[in-house]
Image: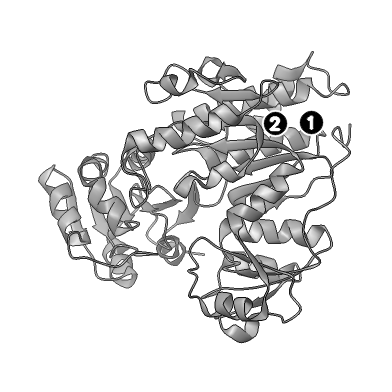
Amino acid sequence: MNNVYRGSKEFPFPKKVHFVGIGGIGMSALAQMMLDNGVSVSGSDLEGSPVTEMLEAKGVVVNIPQVAENVPEDAELIVYSDAVPEGNTERMRATELGIEQRSYFQALGMVSEGKRTVAIAGTHGKTTTTGMLARVLKDAGASPTAVIGSIVKDFKSNYLAGTSDLFVVEACEYRRHFLNLSPEVLIVTNIEFDHTDYFRDLTDVQDAFRTLMERVPSHGLIVTDATHPNIAPLLEKVVAKVVDYTKEASFTLKLPGEFNQMNARAAAAAARFVLVKAPEFSLEHFDLFLTASLADFHGTWRRFEYKGKTKNGAEVYDDYAHHPTAIALTLAEVKKRTTGKVYVAFHPHLYSRTRDLFDGFSYAFTNADIVYIAPIYAAREIEDGTISSMLLAERIAAHGTEAHAAESFEEIETLLAGATSGDSIVTMGAGDIYKVADALVDI
């Protein structure tokens, strides 16, 4: 069965687009989508990465670093990453040239308006859930287009090209960006206080999700943990049907952990709703098909990813976890499969998050034996002297887990050299701590 959902609308973009910050995981996916739709794409970033290398292999011109001369004078649109400020040299050049500019999420919203959108939101698990759902719908012949927040091993990309009007997209709550989308189906995996540099508190986060949920139309679907205290109050005025994914049966998966079971259940509930609308797809054997598809899903880059072994035989994992809950859940699973010690190299992401969730971080490493903390990844923020990796290490140690602040990745690599067979090493964080895992693995 092929192309269940034909009839996508004309792709709503001009013929020449330049991406500022093209190495971003979402930006690179959108760039690939435009390339597949006949748009001439160029881009720039501050430094190269596996993502920019992937784009270059597909024929995209990627300029490193960012300078005004990178902007083509005949570009018709500039798409910029959320991390790129208005004062960026390429954005200022685009202003001089009179080129229209849109943020990544505004551009994504333009795609969403013309397609049947399935959006996956939540504090944790949305990337894996998006990848799982895209894989299931692809296997069913629904030919979805998908934009995913990491490189999915099954597709070898963060983008899946489709020919139907079905659009599967990871939806980020930061700065209420997901309100640019027009979802017919919405998955909300969970809701916690995060992005503390923008949201005031949990109530503010919930308000953003409530607005999104209430936008799902009456013929649509919301898939969520409907009885969770952080979510249940938000469903009072929704008009869409609500399905509780926690009621789904468990699955046999390649991916470990109860958190991945929950991701699979959410993907399954959404897939059932989407596919029942396809007359060519029989639901008679849906459960058997779904089980087989999810069982063969191989996971995504930096989501509890097994990297290999060090030269001394220690197992190495890499994970994107940068919130206390995700850290604790991942380390609990690592502890189960480790006979020796669990070593963690943690890269805190943002001063604001580290400071505002400080107590949560201090307890999140109880399943580790030794924690090495890299300097805080500043990203868009300026250090104000109120928080540091040293302070976090001291608080973690006060709760009974050995913890040390390190000055560099190189120092962490040296400190981890003592791990041996039976031990596990986990690099964790939303920055580039994965480079430590790559360096440690004996290729």
Pointer 1: residues within 10 angstroms few (<14), some, or many (20+)? Answer: many
Query: Residue visible at 67% across and 76% down?
Result: 98
Query: Hey, what amino acid is under mark 1?
Result: Ala
In the image shown, does 181 or 158 lie closer to the viewer?
181
Dot 1: what SS? loop
Kindly give the residue lying farthest to the left in the view shown: 398
In the image shown, does 129 or 175 lie closer to the viewer?
175
- Indicate the position of residue 24 as horizontal and vertical percent values: 56, 62
Q: Which residue is mark 1?
A: 140
Query: Residue visible at 23% across and 52% down?
Result: 355
Asked if the residue at tag 1 contacts the one at tag 2, i.e. Cβ–Cβ closer than 8 Å, the answer is yes
Q: Is residue 297 visible?
A: no
Kindly give the residue lying farthest to the bottom in the view shown: 69
Name the quadrant containing residue 289: top right
- Indicate the position of residue 293 as horizontal and vertical percent values: 70, 31
First in residue order: circle 2 vs circle 1: 1
Query: Hey, what amino acid is under mark 2?
Result: Ser
Considering only vertical position in the picture, is 159 above or below 290?
below
Pointer 2: residues within 10 angstroms few (<14), some, or many (20+)? Answer: some
Dot 2: what SS? helix
Question: Is residue 265 found left or right of 312 in the rendered image?
Answer: right
Q: Which residue is mark 2?
A: 293
Question: Is residue 254 found left or right of 354 in the rendered image?
Answer: right
Considering only vertical position in the picture, is 206 above or below 322?
above
Question: Is residue 432 found left or right of 43 in the rendered image?
Answer: left
Any mark on residue 214, and which?
none
In the image shown, does 79 or 354 lie closer to the viewer?
79
